[in-house]
């Protein structure tokens, strides 16, 4: 158990819909990262927050947004969903911005 | 642009033999490298890391080698065990940066 909790574990939704993925980092970790893993793809970095502030942005679509709340949990919002958004979405946390990250079990999103 | 590449999607090794997983990177500014292991239906788990000030780091059966001039790192597992069967991701980044770049992973199968 990495200490990082992601909910829900599975999500099936229709195209055009909006979903919210939630992540609770390890206790004390200030940094939260979101990654997307599509079929046969590596882990694509989406966005990072550190203590409530956005620190880095990767290949995140404009339809996607995220935030980190004062209690340090984070949410990834995906809107106007397309079939190609079907993927595993991982959240990871670390104590600071350049230390080893610990991953949650992921949310499997299926867009039908 | 894939800054971290794992060119072997899969590898099969006999139990007790050495497993060698390779990883190449393109950005000469990267100075911190990590390996993660991922079992099905689980998030990636941190395995071992190496800083660019070293060329080797060892942790039990796992050793990571870094060749900075070739921009290449490798993970050696000796002896390989069936429980090592998993997907291995390498990641690279700047120790003062905000994100790590992941490769696409190598699926290791250790045959009993």
Image (cartoon, coloured by chain):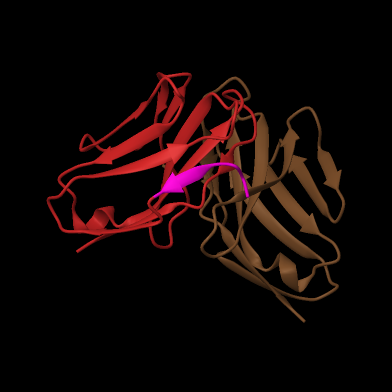
Chain colours: A red, B brown
The percent position of residue A56, horizontal first and vertical second, equals 42, 25
Q: Which quadrant of the structure image shows residue B112?
A: bottom right
Q: Can residue B2 be seen in this view?
A: no
B81 in magenta: no
Task: Check the image and name the residue furthest to the left.
Answer: A16
Q: Which quadrant of the structure image shows residue A60?
A: top left
- Say left or right for B55 vs A98: right
Q: Identify the magenta region.
A: A1-7
- Say left or right for B21 vs A79: right
Task: Check the image and name the residue furthest to the bottom.
Answer: B112
Q: Which quadrant of the structure image shows residue B42?
A: bottom right
Classify A26 as above or below B79.
Answer: above
Q: In which quarter of the image is the N terminus of chain B?
A: top left
The percent position of residue A43, horizontal first and vertical second, equals 47, 48
The percent position of residue A87, horizontal first and vertical second, equals 35, 56
Task: Work out whether residue A94 or residue B18 is closer to the camera in this orientation and state it.
Answer: A94
The percent position of residue A93, horizontal first and vertical second, equals 54, 34
Classify B13 as above or below A73.
Answer: below
> At 54% across and 65% down in the image, what residue appears?
B40
Classify B102 as above or below B50.
Answer: below
Classify A86 as above or below B103.
Answer: below
**How many numbered circles are shown?**
0
Q: Can residue B18 be seen in this view?
A: yes
């Amino acid at each position: 158990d990495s200490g990082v909790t992601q909910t829900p574990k599975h999500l099936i939704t229709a195209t055009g819909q909006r979903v919210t993925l939630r992540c609770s980092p390890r206790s004390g970790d200030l940094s939260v990262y979101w990654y997307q893993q599509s079929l046969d793809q590596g882990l694509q970095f989406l966005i990072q927050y550190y203590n409530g502030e956005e620190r880095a942005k990767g290949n995140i679509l404009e339809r996607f947004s995220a935030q980190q709340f004062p209690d340090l949990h984070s949410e990834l919002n995906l809107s106007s969903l397309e079939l190609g958004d079907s993927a595993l979405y991982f959240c990871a946390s670390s104590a600071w911005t350049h230390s080893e990250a610990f991953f949650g079990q992921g949310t499997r999103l299926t867009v039908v | 642009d894939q800054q971290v590449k794992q060119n072997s999607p899969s590898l099969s090794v006999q139990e007790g033999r050495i497993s060698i997983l390779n990883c190449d990177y393109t950005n000469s500014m990267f100075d911190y490298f990590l390996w993660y292991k991922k079992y099905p239906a689980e998030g990636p788990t941190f395995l071992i890391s190496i800083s660019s000030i070293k060329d080797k780091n060892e942790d039990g059966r796992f050793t990571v080698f870094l060749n900075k001039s070739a921009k290449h790192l490798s993970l050696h597992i000796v002896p390989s065990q069936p429980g090592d069967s998993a997907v291995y991701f390498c990641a690279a980044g700047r120790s003062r940066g905000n994100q790590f770049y992941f490769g696409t992973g190598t699926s290791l199968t250790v045959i009993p």
